[in-house]
Amino acid sequence: MHVEDLLRLESLDLTLLWGDRPQLTREITGVTATDLEDPGRFLQRGELVLSGLVWWDPADDEAKAERFVAALEEAGAVALLAGEETHGGVPEVLVEACRRHGIAILSVPVHTSFRAVTDTVYLRQWGDLSRRPAAPYALPENVRAELSRLLADGTDPDTLLTRSVAHLGTPPAYVLSATGRTIARTPTAPLLPARRAAEAVTATTTLSVDPDASAYAQWHLHLPEPVGTPPRMLHEIAEVLAQHRRATLRRETTARGRATDLLALIDTSSSAAAPAALGRALEACGLADQDPYTVITVKGAADNDGTVDALTEALHHLTDCGFAVGRLPTAEPGEATAVIGTRTRTDSRTDPIATTLKNLWPTLQSRNAKVPLHGGISTPAATPQTLKGALTQARYALTAASSRRAPGTEAPTSNLAAIEDLTTLDALLTGIPADVRTAFGIHALGPLADDTNPSHRMLLGTLDVFLTHNGSWARTAEALHLHVNTVHYRIQRVEMLTGRDLARLDHKLDLKAALLCR
């Protein structure tokens, strides 16, 4: 099969960005999907390279694209197929680098999966993996047959990984999740601490098991020591693991449907859902006897379908906790919710679930840094009948997390907030929807809400300093470099315009809240 043959396939809908006759008539010997910045060591001469361009950023200099393409040329790659999804197109700087190095470059539209390209090449070139004769750099026939039987029997990932690399002498090998959970390891592989495992996911000795999965649902094959194995063989091992992964995802999809039914029942109930119906829904999700329950709601980008994957991956880090992840029927796009069963009660003031997830959040966020992930966590619900209240808390905490601002910026921080964090007036107010906060500020401040008036801006500034200094005339005057009489006059003006008496604590709190809501 030649590069130009791919362009003739309407099902793939590829577009040639650069390449002339000598490039397009090169024969394809294999396919490698990679998002490594320097993939050269994993490539074999004659291979087609698929890349989602996650390694590249618009802020990067030209040299980064140059190094990537130079690695392809040195390894003897025949062409680069670049995905359009990450950047909305293929960067021109990459096209120019391919032109300089004589590497054909084709763009892969969003609706064409890398899996479709890989399957097309292998089916056309070699036929089905289990039927084709063993190539010099492919898994031996007896190994493929054994792995097929193990997959059909639904074996565990530890056994599948161990048998996959047994003919290589069973070197240390791991299957890691996107955030570094160890899903499987060979007997020769020592336990990998969570932090090191998270770093290993991005190492050059790590291969993505399923490039089509979301950034949060990825599994990675990690060999910490060089074994001299031909890249094609590692890719075939990764494909076997991918089949196991897809079976896992099918089970998760079914479970998400049951979780969505549970969430719908909780959301639509009044003070308490019918105990029998709620009990059946919890039982269907495997949570019937796991109270107390915690609810968490997470929101990513509006068009990001990976939010459920992100939340699922995060909750896998909780020990001794069952959970059900789904979508509320009333949820906004990009929003996912989970009910977590803990089985044990704690008298600690610090929620261990919240602590674990907060520690994990930066790693989870880094797996797709361009999509901010915000989350809200409820306090534990003692009984199934109080899950409605826990859901309300989680959504309120989510709004608070989304409204937080990074110091000195107008952009919200990527954050996870728990109800237990809302211990100040400012924190409490962040959970109120923005339009409600704005309306409260306008009505509480009255004419002063019009800060286009220079006089009103001056009065608001004086009020803010006065409340910050606990109503002290002298300290306010000192902070503003004013005479105390001037401060008295301005505060009297504030009282007249707002109808508030700043000698009263409740009125002070009203105006402080109004200032925080602006």
Image (tube, helix red, strand yellow):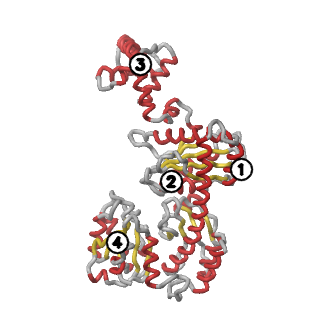
| Position above or below: 437 against 75 | above
Q: Nearer the viewer, mark 2 or mark 4?
A: 4
Q: Find numbered disc 3 in the image and state the secondary structure of the residue it sits on.
A: helix
Residue at 39 percent across and 60 percent down: it is 86
Amino acid type of disc 4?
A: Leu
Q: Which of marks 3 and 4 is in front?
A: 4
Residue 476, numbered circle: 3
Image quarter where the N terminus lies is: bottom left
The residue indicated by pointer 2 is 307
Marks 3 and 4, how far apart in space? 68 Å
Identify the mark nearer the N-term, 4 or 1: 4
The residue indicated by pointer 1 is 288
Q: How crowded is mark 3: few (under 14 residues within 10 Å), some or many (20 or more)?
A: many
The residue indicated by pointer 4 is 14
Amino acid type of disc 3?
A: Thr
Identify the mark nearer the N-term, 2 or 4: 4
